[in-house]
Image (cartoon, rainbow, N blue to C red):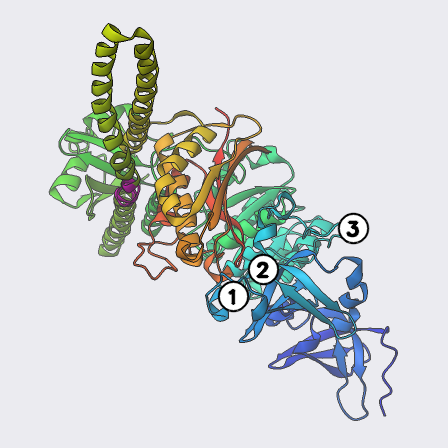
Amino acid sequence: MSNAPAPTALFTCEVIRVMPFGLLVRLEDGRTAVIRERELGWTAEERQNWRQTYRPGVKLQAVMLDERAGESPELSIRLAHADPWLTLTDWLSIGQLVEGVVTAVQPYGVFVELQPGVTGLLHHSNLPAWCKRPIGDAFWPGDAVKAVVQHIDVQQRRIALTMRDIRTVRWSDDARPNGKAPVEMRSGAPVAPKSQSRLPLALAGLPRAYAVLLVDNDDAHRDRWVQWLRSAGQYAVGAASAEDALARLDAGEAFDLVLMDVQLPGMPGPEALARILDDAPEARGVLTSGDWGCLHQDANPALRQLMTRGVRVLPKPFEAEDLLEVLLSLGTTGPAEVTFAHEPKAPGSTYAEPQRLLVQAVLRAQRLTRASLAVLFRLDASARRVEIELPHGDERLAIEATPNLIHSPVRDVAEDRAFCVVEDAGAAAGKLRYLLPLLRFGACLGAPVPADAAHRYALFFFYDRPTAFDEARREQARAGALAVGAALERREMVARIVMVQRDILLGQLNRGLVHEMNNRIPLASESVKSLKRQLDEIERALDVSPTSAHDLVRHVQGMLANAVESVAVLSRMNELFRRFTAQSSVRIVRVDQEAGEAAQMLRDEAERAGVDVKVEPPERMVIVRTNPVYLQHVLLNVMLNAVQQIALLRPRREHREGHVGRVRVRIEERQRRAGPVAIISVEDDGPGIHRQHQQRIFDLGFTTRADGSSGLGLYVAHHLAEAMQGRVYVAESAMLWGTRFVVELPGGV
């Protein structure tokens, strides 16, 4: 007979071992107990990364399930928290539109978690009639779903969901996906509150759980974010000082990410983070502070040095989305972008990601060779000119000396592919007379950069004092040049892909221009012939009946107006395509105007797919300073992707009348810490994007279509958005409901 205490009694215990089936814990009285995996939480999400969440030494509270003599008792963490079904009817009712996450897919239907511990069934018979996809293709575990509550049985703990009439509520203003709580579609019923424990779907994009060390002497701030990271499935620990953090690493702990407060008692945060990165260069570092002034590199020389090593800066207070962005960046190759979070950058002409990889390659080569400075030179052979490719703005370089570099050893290395070794610059002053004015140095190594690029490059490593270079150092210089060459070729490749994809896009859209010409030119030609006949009639009527001639003149005016309209439409379409193919520079543009022109170029493609594309006028004019061709290219790729996905989901031949899908473009301006930001939302009612694909759709060549799609459109959109110092991302997506892409650009002028 069980002598378990009352279910409300909480026991404090400590994890002593992670077992295959759950946790082995020690109670305060010294006894050992077991917590099975199913008792770790109400939801699959809570249990997903339990091996990283619960490590030996972690203390927790649980309820006693069964206490049998001579055997280890069983505990439950789940029962230590409230049963969500007890308050279900307070926030859920029949007819309500709800959002949830797929936890399991069966041949007969999909299980959807609406709130932690509350799961409903979307039976296959309740899917939309137009969905012809197998249920296992339409839904994957982790996907977001929007559905209507059909039936509730609290006693049996069953909820039935339906999507049969989902299109009737899809474009309701109340049902618009906006990240808020699920919306009630039946008057008088309560609205479900947004779960405070629900985590961003983007966490599914993390390739694995990360070990995070958060160093901050503010106990409340530190504990809050340590708990958030643990709930997000990461292994997170906190430290109140730099000394505590260093002690953890000295004890053998390894971390993927270190978030370090700048102002700490004792050792300053930047100094501690520099030591950590010296010992663990594979780790990523982020500096945080509530004093934004000390986060500026001009006021903090130590910070400037850290930023060259890939350390990011995150002002406090930060939000979960800021921390999520840092976590997602851990999945990319190389250090995080060397920039301030929330700080706008001036529009540039290079694509940010390949340029960032090139900068990182040069910095790695500099560290590898232990040089004081590495400089990448570019030789323009046709203009007989040498320029500095990297670094930009280094105060040690005298830019006014660059015109004479064509006469220096830099030209020999870049053009003749010769390796340059100068162990004592003073002794070789004659040879270096055109290079020394650029930079005072004691020794240098120059390596040709092998790259399939439009120009030739040379990578020079400079040292403050005369240095004897052994063969190992020379091989390191060559290796660094190889890595830089690979980064240069990637940059060239991306630029070529952008141009090729633009040609592909133009080929698709030109069908619309040809279609307009085929429709309107014969009409215009016939109008001209008819006009000639009518003019002859008018001439004869003037001699016989002036009244009838007047009627003929009005008829001719109408025909002439139609002909003028046809010519104007063709001229406008031709001008749109001409502008899109022309080179353009950065200037001030109206976002709604550029979006409207992109939609007009896409009109024929959308009409043939049966998709209605509309740009909604913003409440107030939104302007940005950017390259208008880049902006239209991004919007065309995102909008065309939406049209094509809708056409694949609901082929027009299955619908006798009306449009089979919609794409809506909405524009607004929001205020951020660093200033205004233009937000362009492209929302569709297509098939949605599987959660596991949301971080891959911008990868080169990635496509979910089986029709021979190149997978270049969104890849190019990603790079062009970065070129405009913005970004494009999936804001939200629900299966068989649709997707909302967002393009963000620095606003204002």
Q: Name the residue under label 1.
A: 139
The mark total stands at 3
Disc on the earlier residue, 1 or 2: 1
Mark seen at residue 145: 2
Q: Which residues make up the magenta segment?
A: 501-511
Q: What residue type is labelled 3?
A: Gly
> Which SS does the magenta portion mostly show?
helix
Q: Where is residue 271 in the image (x, y as percent from the top left)?
A: 55, 46
Which image quadrant is residue 1 in?
bottom right
**C-alpha span from label 1 to label 3:** 32 Å
Residue beneath the point at 21% across and 20% down: 533
Instruction: Give SS at disc 2.
Output: strand
Percent from the top left, x then y, of residue 57? 68, 71
Q: Are the residues flagged by discs 1 and 2 in contact, CB closer than 8 Å?
A: yes
Q: Which of marks 2 and 3 is in front?
A: 3
Q: Disc 1 marks which amino acid?
A: Phe
Q: Which residue lies furthest to the left in this view?
A: 416
Could you give the CA–CA distance between mark 1 and mark 2, rounded to whole angstroms?
9 Å
Whether residue 323 sits left or right of residue 14 in the image: it is: left
For image coordinates 78% across by 83% down, the residue present is: 31
In the picture shown, does residue 732 fall above or below 338?
Answer: below
Q: Position of residue 137 (x, y in %)?
A: 46, 67
Circles 1, 3 touching at the beta carbon (< 8 Å): no
